[in-house]
Amino acid sequence: MLDFSATYTDQYQLAMSQVYFKKGQKDHTAIFDYYFRKLPYNGGYAIFAGLQDLLKIIENLKFNDKDLEYLKKQDFDDDFLQYLKDFKFHGNIYSVQEGDVVFPTRPILQVEANIIEAQIIETILLNLLNFQTLIATKASRIKLVSGERTLLDFGLRRAQGPGGYYATRAAIIGGFNGTSNVIAGRDFNIPVSGTMAHSFIQSYDDEITAFRDFAEGRPKDCVLLVDTYDTLKSGVPNAITVAKEMEDRGEKLMAIRLDSGDLAYLSKQSRKMLDEAGLDYVKIAASNQLEENVIKSLLEQGARIDVFGVGTNLVIGSPDAALDGVYKLAYSNGKPRIKISESIVKVTLPHKKQVYRLRDTEGNCVGGDLVALFEEDNIKNMIHPFEPYKQMKVDGLEKEALLKPVMENGKNKLEKKSLQEIAEYSKNRLAELSIEYKRFNNPHIYKVGISEALKAERDKLIASFKN
Amino acid sequence: MLDFSATYTDQYQLAMSQVYFKKGQKDHTAIFDYYFRKLPYNGGYAIFAGLQDLLKIIENLKFNDKDLEYLKKQDFDDDFLQYLKDFKFHGNIYSVQEGDVVFPTRPILQVEANIIEAQIIETILLNLLNFQTLIATKASRIKLVSGERTLLDFGLRRAQGPGGYYATRAAIIGGFNGTSNVIAGRDFNIPVSGTMAHSFIQSYDDEITAFRDFAEGRPKDCVLLVDTYDTLKSGVPNAITVAKEMEDRGEKLMAIRLDSGDLAYLSKQSRKMLDEAGLDYVKIAASNQLEENVIKSLLEQGARIDVFGVGTNLVIGSPDAALDGVYKLAYSNGKPRIKISESIVKVTLPHKKQVYRLRDTEGNCVGGDLVALFEEDNIKNMIHPFEPYKQMKVDGLEKEALLKPVMENGKNKLEKKSLQEIAEYSKNRLAELSIEYKRFNNPHIYKVGISEALKAERDKLIASFKN
């Protein structure tokens, strides 16, 4: 129904490509930087996600017969269509590892390819990386306030159409434990879980019969939804009765779920009732318009919730809902390139580059990433990209190169990792950041600077345009 | 890569279904209502979208081998998996027509099927209808302020992953004219258009050579991006030079595009320069973080813009980004069903129902939709669902039945319509609403009421739960 053919792109990529093709520029090498300008949620960091999916798609990207037939009707020229028929991405991609913490204005990923191939993949690259990075970041914020409690994604029904498929994947990278989304569970090997809807209880004449039938029909991971009629007067007492009946059969009720009302109050009362009935092993799950601020508040109020089901606000990345990632030309046609702008913060960085995470001699992050020319060595100073009087000595620091080759000549070179391994990596990388970068209000700003040599190259190009 | 198999659902649908299956309830008929509770954007209406896609998917929905193998590992029982192997949706669906204006709290669509089939389709139904309805509504608001100017969707790169595919489709229903999204253009027969990126101009040593090459390589729908260096000192003068050269070849420059700076001022100055050069046929397109309020303001300032390219804010439906559509049980197991709640506005409506749009004897909409029992006739009064003292006489009014059979016994019965026909229908239906419902601030509230018979049935069920 929805394929990832090479027409998953903007028309202007094809229009420009036809011109490059006809003007003899099709084999010119170009380098593009992927980065974003503004952190989502006014936060202090983002979690990079989507790379594995992107590379798989790019490796197999082609124009199929349906595409070519369509483009012929769109008035593209025959010689160019013949070229598209054999289209395949042959370029190199250098990238930060999926799950790493990333910051604005510095390259997260670099594409080095002939200019047509580099343009045609732009749209799908932005589409997938912007979205998954947004959602992994959102999930990470929810994880930060939830500690070791279990986090489940319940969002597919409110997701932006098939965007929900990748939202679930990104949520796991950001620290979620499971999902209700079966197809994402199937494809990304994510634990799925599911309980019952209100409709299940409504379809019975009384709540306890519904609970009994459910416990008998699906005993292994039985979670009873207790708020259909009256949580404390009906739902929890009925759940306790059924839990005791399960005990008689040698089974255990896994949890009850609260989906409305005052979750702080109801969870505390429910916990008390369950404990008094000797059911201290029965967990309490809660859902209903949750997000990081609500969860933080619930826990501050002493809510006794073991499992949070988070839906809409997670999968759409509310309130931001989009990451402003861009793809900017740094080199083409044998020359470094910049985009100038009246606003200095929008001026791009020319040349192929490397990004280094700075660490002290004990390996601790010092809170800065350095952008330098790719082949540069022996870098002594890091300079603020727009406020040159802000400088930092870096010659005594360890420099971890972040951009690693993940695609070479069109071949996916990414180390095979499960989603759980990516999530674990992300957790460890985030742990290296000190707490000031993670607070929600006015987080500390992570330093991103450039090398003197890169600054000189950029300033030279700016000057040449001023003339 | 991403298929629409029947595992595009929440795990709890399958958990409940296994219980229904094992408890001998698999052939019980259920009726579910699809509706939403709150209009997006604090607006006065929404545009219903996504129906055609949904029905196509449901008609072909099945569990494939990959699904069944996966579910086996998820501990579903063998007899139930055997049932899923033969799963197909055999039910009936009644729906408002795609593109119609719709309002909160009343059914937009009703599913009548055995309870397992009805549950399994719930998630994909909500996922597709919520999202497309949100975006069609957003597009419609942008269209309202833009008059006859051309509206283009440029959003794929910032869309929520593959959600962008359906965002483009929904934008057309809401009144957009075209898109940059090639794959959506291919599949939904939408006009696609594309110009050039800044990277194209950057990849040349000077702007005019870039413009010349582009005009020669893609002369038929040539749009030149004029803000790379300096819009009025470089971009527009160079575009004028190239437009004149095109005239010499018997070609015409279609438009220039502004993508930064003060669009009101720059468009007025550019228009003047183009007109003075005898290029009054060259249109002006503008893009850069546009949405309905920005466009309204630009036009109030006299901006001379013929084409608006709208990206992020359209395709993610900012600032709301999700419609709160729900799917509620109204009938099952031979009985009408309601969901009670402490909040009366969340109490659902039991039984199979019909919804009527009320018109006076001349056929004009009177600003109300009436929800009644399906087979009800001779309805005299409409009552506010939660404030029963608010009543309206309806016996002299024409009643247009809105819920029409669109799927019968699992067969798609939807009248074949192009996207353009759906958009045209939507335009006409929206035109029937008076302007007070369309304003952005405190719009007039469209009345949605229930019949006396439906109210009596609901109240009887509420009373039975109170005992």
Image: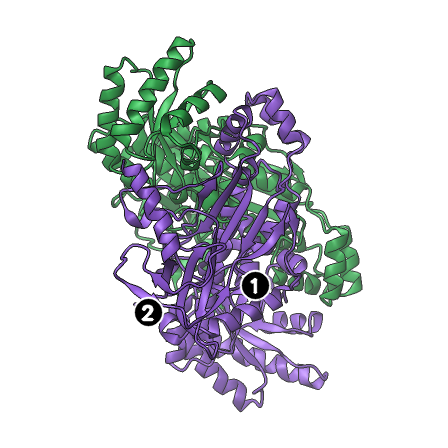
Chain colours: A green, B purple
The chain identifier of the residue carrying mark 2 reads B
Of mark 1 and mark 2, the one earlier in the sequence is: 1
Q: Mark 1 points at which residue?
A: B197
Q: What element carries label 2?
A: loop
Q: In this view, does A216 lie to the left or right of B56?
A: left
Relative horizontal placement of residue B301, taking residue B420 as reference (left or right): left
* Tag 2: amino acid: His
List the residue tagged with mark 2.
Answer: B444
Front residue of A114 and A298: A298
Quadrant of the rendered structure where residue A154 is? top left
Residue A39 visible? The answer is no
Q: Where is residue B441 in the image (x, y as percent from the top left)?
A: 31, 68
Where is residue B79? Give x, y as percent.
62, 22
Q: How far apart are marks 1 and 2 (CA)?
A: 42 Å
Q: Is residue A65 above or below residue A108?
A: below
* B457 or A53: nearer the viewer: B457
Q: Where is residue A346 in the image (x, y as percent from the top left)?
A: 42, 59
How many numbered tags mark residues here? 2
Q: Residue A431 sits in which quadrant?
A: top left
Q: In this view, does A202 lie above or below A64?
A: above
Q: Residue at x 58, y 87 (%)?
A: B279
What's the residue at 64%, 73% (across, down)? B222
